[in-house]
Amino acid sequence: MEAFYSLASGLSVAIQPMNLLFALIGVLLGTAVGVLPGIGPALTVALLLPITFKLDPGGSIIMFAGIYYGGMYGGSTTAILINTPGESASMATALEGNKMAKAGRGGPALATAAIGSFVAGTIATLGLTFLAPYLVDIAVSFGPEDYFALMCVAFITVSATFGDSPVRGLTSLFIGLLLGLVGIDILSGQSRLSFGIPELYDNIEVTTLAVGLFAVGEALYVASRRHIEEEKLEPVRGSLWMTKEDWKRSWKPWIRGTLFGFPIGALPAGGAEIPTFLSYSTEKRLTKHPEEFGHGAIEGVAGPEAANNASAAGTLVPLLTLGLPTSATAAMMLAGFQQYGLNPGPLLFAERPDLVWGLIASLFIANGMLLVLNLPLVGLWVRLLAIPQPWLYAGILVFATIGTIAANPSPVELIMLTVFGVLGFLMRRFDFPIAPVVVGLILGPVAESQLRRALSISLGDPMVLLESPISATLLVIALIALILPFVMKGLGRFKAVED
Amino acid sequence: MTTSPQRRIDVAGLAIALILLALAGLVWWDMSKLQILSPYDLGPKVMPIVVSAGLILLAIGNGISALRGDLPTRESLDWTPIVLILGGLAILIALITLGWGFIIGTAILFAATSTAFGRRAFLVDLLIGAGLALFVYLLLGKLLTLSLPAGPLERLF
């Protein structure tokens, strides 16, 4: 019951007025960016990193977590009312949700999404509360070689195992790892891949990369294919409230969605797409109304929405206990910790329990705030969708460039932003996943330092990676995760089968 | 996933493979200039070697999918908006390098992007962009005291 005690002390941190305010700003921003197409939580955190540099670490991180949770709520609104989901985690929601909106049942669809997100978020955050101390206990015994092996697992699963193409996923990852090499190597003081450019000596800024890939890349991509498709906003008609029948049909999918979302999010497997589509196909199989699927079945909204929120909470488990980001947003949150010199992991739980438990406790509060923000106030968020697309993207680019030069006032930084923007555009066009690049840049240098620490302890003998039982097991898992998608061609394809 | 019935060699895919190969070479060349300080291990060379080797394998992998025509089908591309947005960014970079501050450049970027997304009101958008940039300047520069590149316009405030 140690977790209860820690949570209670965390709660006393979370209810401080300043932290409540940070949480509120976070969930407001998060919902807004979730609703707006073209901006996601990862980009928002990236843009806020330079601005929050001078603020209190605890408050900023609470805000980042609020943005993450809020983005998951807001994304469903866009998915239901416009057929284009705000982020990939809402793709399953769009399948049934948009059909419901077209049939005049947009209100209940939004309601089951919001309540399902709340139920799932709360259960999953409880899961995080009780799981985290156990994982921390295990993680304490990890040596550098074990950490390195664990990161290998994360690298592989994030990039190769569940994507459409393992080759393209790994290519993205290695581009990220390459970018992670740039700059002065801390251990030897030598510069790598810097070519005498001063801005490159102190590493590539995560902010610049993320903003370039997500903001500039997305703007270029959407602009280049504007002539192909037009988005259509579905007005919310009829009652906002769910009927008794709707409740009866929703609660089981919420629970099942949570059970898919949390464990898969907590495993270093990355992404909310897998649990959402697993939940969608399960609901489709179990439903008593199979004829409604494809025409707006409420189960198809309730399950996946619960799954994507639960997986967001699940992602925080490896992030907080091991310092392992498994999604783009989690990677940006790790960068958020790093900018204050904080390294998530067992040590952080021991040294700054106020910060970690304050964050976890504030997640419960953020969840409650989001339920209020998204149920009665959903009409307000829908208005955001009325912002004309030209102004929306022009505004995004203005904030992207200003955020970048605020972090590093140098034209070279903007040139890098543009280059990364073009990279992001090309990656979207040729269907390379974006998240592995960001994870590679952030986690690559960490993995390198763990590997080199392990090698210097073993006096350069690489066998140390196989002699530790933990490390050996993890490396075998990584190897299986790498080979599996090549052997079983269909693993990542259930995504495609559904639509 | 629609694989086209007739499999053709994908030129763009081959270009990607060649770029990856070039990057692998660049990392290797850069690595070869590093010095090893510790007698026991490869130190700063370990990661570049791993990355370089990985990129070579991936260049081969991408090359194979290009030859088999496995790349996803791509829709036609409208170049005008891309040129407009990149042009806006280039002007912003040039103006900041010349010391004109960022408000003018940002306003031009705003108007250029807005035009790229189909609006036909360049002058109005120029003013909106300038207003937005000014708002951000006051917020970040004055309230949060971050240093932003200043030019003649910024010094007025």
Image: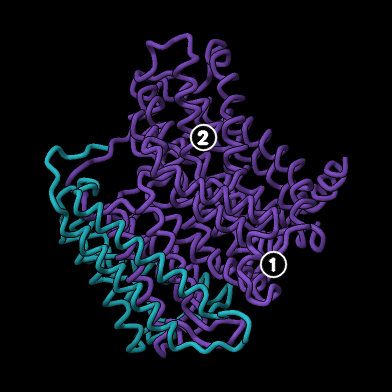
Chain colours: A purple, B cyan
Q: Position of residue A95 (x, y in %)?
A: 37, 28
Give the CA distance from mark 1 to mark 2.
30 Å
- Is residue A370 among the parts visible in the rendering? yes
Provide the secondary structure element on which disc 1 rests: loop
Q: Position of residue B2 (x, y in %)?
A: 23, 37
Nearer to me, A301 or B109 = A301
The answer to whether A202 appears left or right of A237 in the picture is: right
Q: Which residue is mark 2?
A: A275
- Is residue A403 among the parts visible in the rendering? no
Residue under mark 2: which chain is it in? A
Q: Amino acid at mark 2?
A: Pro
Q: Is residue A99 above or below residue B16?
A: above
Residue at left 48%, top 37%?
Answer: A274
Nearer to me, B67 or B114 = B67
Q: Which residue is mark 1?
A: A342
Q: Position of residue A120 (x, y in %)?
A: 62, 32
Quadrant containing the C terminus of chain A is: top left
Q: Amino acid at mark 1?
A: Leu
Q: Quadrant of residue A122?
A: top right
Say whether marks 1 and 2 touch (CB < 8 Å): no
Nearer to me, A269 or B114 = A269
Q: Nearer the viewer, mark 1 or mark 2?
A: 2
Q: Quadrant of residue A163?
A: top left
Using a 10 Å C-alpha cutoff, classify the residue at mark 2 as few (fewer than 14 neighbours), some (14 to 19) or many (20 or more): many
The answer to whether A341 appears left or right of B74 in the picture is: right
Quadrant containing the N terminus of chain A is: top right
Using a 10 Å C-alpha cutoff, classify the residue at mark 1 as few (fewer than 14 neighbours), some (14 to 19) or many (20 or more): some
Q: Is residue A139 above or below residue A194?
A: above
> Do circles 1 and 2 both sit on a common chain?
yes
Which sits earlier in the primary sequence, circle 1 or circle 2?
A: 2
Q: Is residue A288 above or below residue A106?
A: above
Residue under mark 1: which chain is it in? A
